[in-house]
Image (cartoon, rainbow, N blue to C red):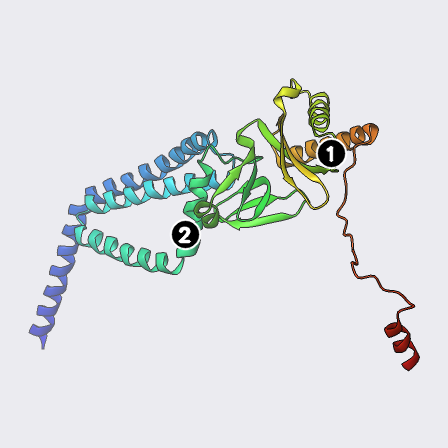
């Protein structure tokens, strides 16, 4: 019994001596690994601030800027962790950690694929020069001013002050018309005049009114005027001209002003803008003295 106890005690002492020797042997590597992690931590802080300032010059959204800064910090800390594990000769642990991270990342990616798609789409939209906050755009049936682009959605404010929130993925996968990319817009105006009107006079009068109403139109020759059809109650035309505008609201105001001035000019010159008229014509002549009609009334 005493010999067995001494043997167990000896084994324990050997184990403790082995652990002690291993600890003493790995102390320099451990200290170096700690220094690597500390350096990675402070490097991530300064890198995050630097990238934040760099991104803020290209992106106005705070949410996007903060997200990119945090991602850069996490990447640097992760690199520091892998280097520290390598310094401590924990290659197997590093391999297991990478394999586990891959499995977890795959599971998270499958579970949050919609959210991740919107996140990456938000990052892409934030770096697009042709889509900026304050632009007037039209997409997926909605038109309005861009008031926010974040990691989840794309927010528009329509002309009636309604807020429309659209997923970033939808914006990225569908056509988008940006009215703010150009300082000029073409106004289309359709109208009709009576068949009795002098068509040449109508054309010249309309061009003159447009040229005198808008400073951007230098002369009447810059106004396009085309008769399009013989309508049911009028001869219809299409008038087109360019204005300086960056939003649909300015375009609508210009069209409204043009309609008002053209109506005033037509009224002054006696030019008729007819509304649809339906004429009923009876070719069969009925007479109350007809024998058949008198017989019908007498039977009733």
Identity of the residue furthest to the front in this view: 291
What residue would you read off at disc 1?
259
Query: In this rendering, does residue 216 appear at all?
Result: no
Marks 2 and 1 close (CB-CB < 8 Å):
no
In the rendered image, the vertical position of residue 299 relative to residue 209, given as above or below? below
| Picture coordinates of residue 101, whole percent (x, y) | 29, 55
Q: Is residue 248 left or right of residue 57?
A: right
In this rendering, the label closer to the viewer, 2 or 1: 1
What residue would you read off at disc 2?
116
Quarter-of-image position of residue 201:
top right
Quarter-of-image position of residue 297:
bottom right
Q: Residues within 10 Å of mark 1 (few under 14, many from 20)?
A: some
Q: Nearer the viewer, residue 70 or 238?
A: 238
Q: Nearer the viewer, residue 243 or 234?
A: 234
First in sequence: mark 2 or mark 1?
2
Quarter in which the N terminus is drawn: bottom left
Identity of the residue furthest to the top in this view: 218
Secondary structure at badge 1 equals helix
Q: Is residue 134 left or right of residue 173?
A: right
Secondary structure at badge 2 equals helix
Q: Nearer the viewer, residue 25 or 175?
A: 175
Q: CA distance from mark 2 to mark 1?
A: 49 Å
At 63% from the left and 40% from the top, the residue drawn is 229
Quarter in which the C terminus is drawn: bottom right
Query: In this rendering, does residue 71 appear at all?
Result: yes
Q: Residues within 10 Å of mark 2 (few under 14, many from 20)?
A: some
| Picture coordinates of residue 36, whole percent (x, y) | 27, 39
At 47% from the left and 32% from the top, the residue drawn is 56
| Picture coordinates of residue 95, whole percent (x, y) | 20, 53
| Picture coordinates of residue 280, whole percent (x, y) | 78, 55
In the rendered image, the vertical position of residue 74 relative to residue 106, given as above or below? above
């Amino acid at each position: 019994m005493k010999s067995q106890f001494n043997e167990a005690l000896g084994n324990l002492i050997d184990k403790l001596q082995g652990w002690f020797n291993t600890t003493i042997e790995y102390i320099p590597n451990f200290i170096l690994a700690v220094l690597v992690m500390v350096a990675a931590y402070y490097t991530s802080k300064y890198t995050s601030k630097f990238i934040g300032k760099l991104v803020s010059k290209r992106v106005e959204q705070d949410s996007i800027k903060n997200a990119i800064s945090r991602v850069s910090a996490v990447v640097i800390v992760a690199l520091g962790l892998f280097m520290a594990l390598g310094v401590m000769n924990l290659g197997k642990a590093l391999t297991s950690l990478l394999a586990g991270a891959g499995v977890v990342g795959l599971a998270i990616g499958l579970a949050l694929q919609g959210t991740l798609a919107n996140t990456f789409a938000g990052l892409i939209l934030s770096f697009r020069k042709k889509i900026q906050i304050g632009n007037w755009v039209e997409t997926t049936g909605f038109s309005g001013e861009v008031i926010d682009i974040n990691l989840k959605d794309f927010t528009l404010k329509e002309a009636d002050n309604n807020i429309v929130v659209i997923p970033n993925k939808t914006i990225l996968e569908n056509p988008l018309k940006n009215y703010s990319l150009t300082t000029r817009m073409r106004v289309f105006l359709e109208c009709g005049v009576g068949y009795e009107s002098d068509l040449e006079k109508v054309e010249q009068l309309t061009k003159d009114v447009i040229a005198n109403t808008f400073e951007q139109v230098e002369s009447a020759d810059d106004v396009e005027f085309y008769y399009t059809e013989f309508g049911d109650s009028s001869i219809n035309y299409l008038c087109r001209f360019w204005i300086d505008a960056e939003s649909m609201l300015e375009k609508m105001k210009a069209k409204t002003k043009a309609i008002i001035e053209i109506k005033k000019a037509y009224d002054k010159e006696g030019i008729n803008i007819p509304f649809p008229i339906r004429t009923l014509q009876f070719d069969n002549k009925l007479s109350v003295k007809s024998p058949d009609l008198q017989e019908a009334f007498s039977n009733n």
